[in-house]
Image (cartoon, rainbow, N blue to C red):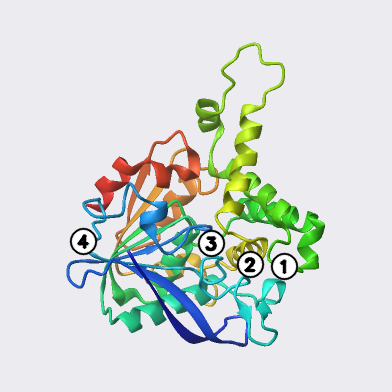
Amino acid sequence: MIRQEIKVNLNLECGGVLENARIVFHTSGAKTGKVIWICHALTANSDPEDWWPEMVGPGKTIDTEKSQVVCVNMLGSAYGTEGPARENPATGKPWMLDFPDVTIRDTVTTFEAVRKHIGIKKIDLLIGASNGGFDAIEWAISAPELFNRCLFLCTAPRISPFLGATVEAQRMALEADPTFREARSLDGGREGLKCARAQALISYRCFKGYGLTQREEDPDTLFAGRVASYERYQGEKLVRRGFDAYSYYCLCNALDSHNAGRGRGGVQKALQAIKARTTVVAVDSDLIFPPAESREWTAWIPGAQYVEISSNFGHDGFLLETAKLSALIL
């Protein structure tokens, strides 16, 4: 995948303009074949070969040599697109907590800017998973003529109270780190970020998954420590790959804005605007987007197909159940 960027002036949904905002994206470089647009999840980036290597790449299910694959780094991310880690032109320092409030719809506005820049007039397949699915659903509603097919994975048309609660707990972890509010450098809130990531991972997996991978091997263990080590490792891992607490905080706030029915007469009416051939995929062990919820709103999209796959790994099944997902994409 080839990294590129553009700069645009963004009229934000909450008011104001983000001037000369940098938008980072990756394309496969292919100029022919199907156009496949991938919307990434919370802490991923615009290179799906990096975070979805079993699915995306030369010769893979999403073949980067045969299809024009596009992925845009979402607004507020730590990986290049305008966000708290970028320089505030008014101060010459990173925005951090001064970065303006952005919404899911603002991110979709950046998608449109990239699409027009590339010159894409039709998208054969739009894929969005988790909060990337928030972006995909919003875009499919706002530009229904643009898409032939949509694949929404482990997602929803509106943030639920349960997901909102997990997001707030993660923000509280950031705020509990005294260095976060000091905002002296992008290193602020680092320990809080590790804790927030560890909290998030619990909701991404499930009881059975932890039991399979983190169970103590010694039946006489006095104090169980394997899973504790795993949780701490996951927090450290996010920090080591360059994520900062302020970008994470911004993205959590953006999740709260997700409501595809806002200003459209409610979610059910909004989803009826989708014209693409749509498949909604749920994972049977997903704690964040349970199948019962997904089954309900799938019925509101004209002609949509609902598919439920089985996984021991909860919400993260959309990343790990490659063979099952490949069958739906091909």
Earlier-in-chain disc, 1 versus 3: 3
Q: CA distance from mark 4 to mark 1?
A: 41 Å
Which label lies toward us, 2 or 3?
Answer: 2
Q: Residue under label 3, please give it.
A: 158
Earlier-in-chain disc, 2 versus 3: 3
Q: Residue under label 1, please give it.
A: 185
Q: Amino acid at mark 4?
A: Glu
Q: Amino acid at mark 1?
A: Ser
x, y (%) of residue 217? Answer: 56, 18
Q: Is residue 178 left or right of residue 185?
A: right
x, y (%) of residue 125? Answer: 28, 64
Task: Tell me which residue sits at (57%, 72%) in the image.
Answer: 103
The total number of labels drawn is 4
Q: Residue under label 2, please give it.
A: 250
Which label lies toward us, 4 or 2?
Answer: 4
Front one among 118 and 292: 118
> Callout 2: helix, strand or loop?
helix
Q: Quadrant of residue 298?
A: bottom left
x, y (%) of residue 307? Answer: 34, 46
Earlier-in-chain disc, 4 versus 3: 4
Verify CB contact (< 8 Å) between mark 4 and mark 3.
no
Task: Tell me which residue sits at (18%, 62%) in the image.
Answer: 66
